[in-house]
Image (cartoon, rainbow, N blue to C red):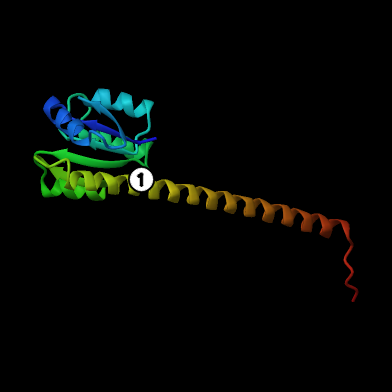
């Protein structure tokens, strides 16, 4: 089974170019032409990677990324846009956990595809880390319950057994 990717662009020619470049790759690609369509697809199916433009109808790219950060924190986001200011770049990379930012035009066959491969690997690492973190949290909770039970048994023993200390 291939990887899952959502490609969001309001430009049909860019969507076609991307789909042509991904041709025989083992990636299940879904597309959306606006933010509302993208949000509906994101709610329905979890994608490992989402590639989005910033200027979209309906919800914009920033809103899509913010939603992904909250609802699908393991999903890796890549921005593909024509312009981005240094302040925006800083914001997306540091505040919205965007994996890569590409400025148009880009060759989808080379550098962009390499970034996609890395993004899928990064997704796997995120999922593994989240699973390990969940296991650790479960172990901590189990240990806390054991400690409470132990304290309760000790307390019961103290109440039942008279003190053996004589003065």
Left or right of 30 on screen, residue 1: right
90, above or below 15, in the image: below
Left or right of 79 on screen, residue 126: right
Q: Quadrant of the N terminus?
A: top left
Q: Quadrant of the C terminus?
A: bottom right
What residue does disc 1 label? 123
Q: Residues within 10 Å of mark 1 (few under 14, many from 20)?
A: many
Q: Nearer the viewer, residue 12 or 57?
A: 12
Q: Residue furthest bottom?
A: 167
99, above or below 71, in the image: below
Q: Position of residue 49 (x, y in %)?
A: 30, 39
Q: Nearer the viewer, residue 53 or 121?
A: 121
Q: Position of residue 11 (x, y in %)?
A: 13, 27
Please count the marks in the image.
1
Residue 156 seen in the current view: yes
Q: Residue at x 87, y 56 (%)?
A: 160
When asked about the image quadrant of residue 68, the answer is top left
Per the image, label 1 sits on a secondary structure element best described as helix
Residue 97 seen in the current view: no
Q: Position of residue 78 (x, y in %)?
A: 23, 42
Q: Residue furthest front?
A: 24
Q: Residue at x 89, y 69 (%)?
A: 164
When asked about the image quadrant of residue 35, the answer is top left
Q: Position of residue 74 (x, y in %)?
A: 37, 43
Q: Nearer the viewer, residue 37 or 105?
A: 105
């Amino acid at each position: 089974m291939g990887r899952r990717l959502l490609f969001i662009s309001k430009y049909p020619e860019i969507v076609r170019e991307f789909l042509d470049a991904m041709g025989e790759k083992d990636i299940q690609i879904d597309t959306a032409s606006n933010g509302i369509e993208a949000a509906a697809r994101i709610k329905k199916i979890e994608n490992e990677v989402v590639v989005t433009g910033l200027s979209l109808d309906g919800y914009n790219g920033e809103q899509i990324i913010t939603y992904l950060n909250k609802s699908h924190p393991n999903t890796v986001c890549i921005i593909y846009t024509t312009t981005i200011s240094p302040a925006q770049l800083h914001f997306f990379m540091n505040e919205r956990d965007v994996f890569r930012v590409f400025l148009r035009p880009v060759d989808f066959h080379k550098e962009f595809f390499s970034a996609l491969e890395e993004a899928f690997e990064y997704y796997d690492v995120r999922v593994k880390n989240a699973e390990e973190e969940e296991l650790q949290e479960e172990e901590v909770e189990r240990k806390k319950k054991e400690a409470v039970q132990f304290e309760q048994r000790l307390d019961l023993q103290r109440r039942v057994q008279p003190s053996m200390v004589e003065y």
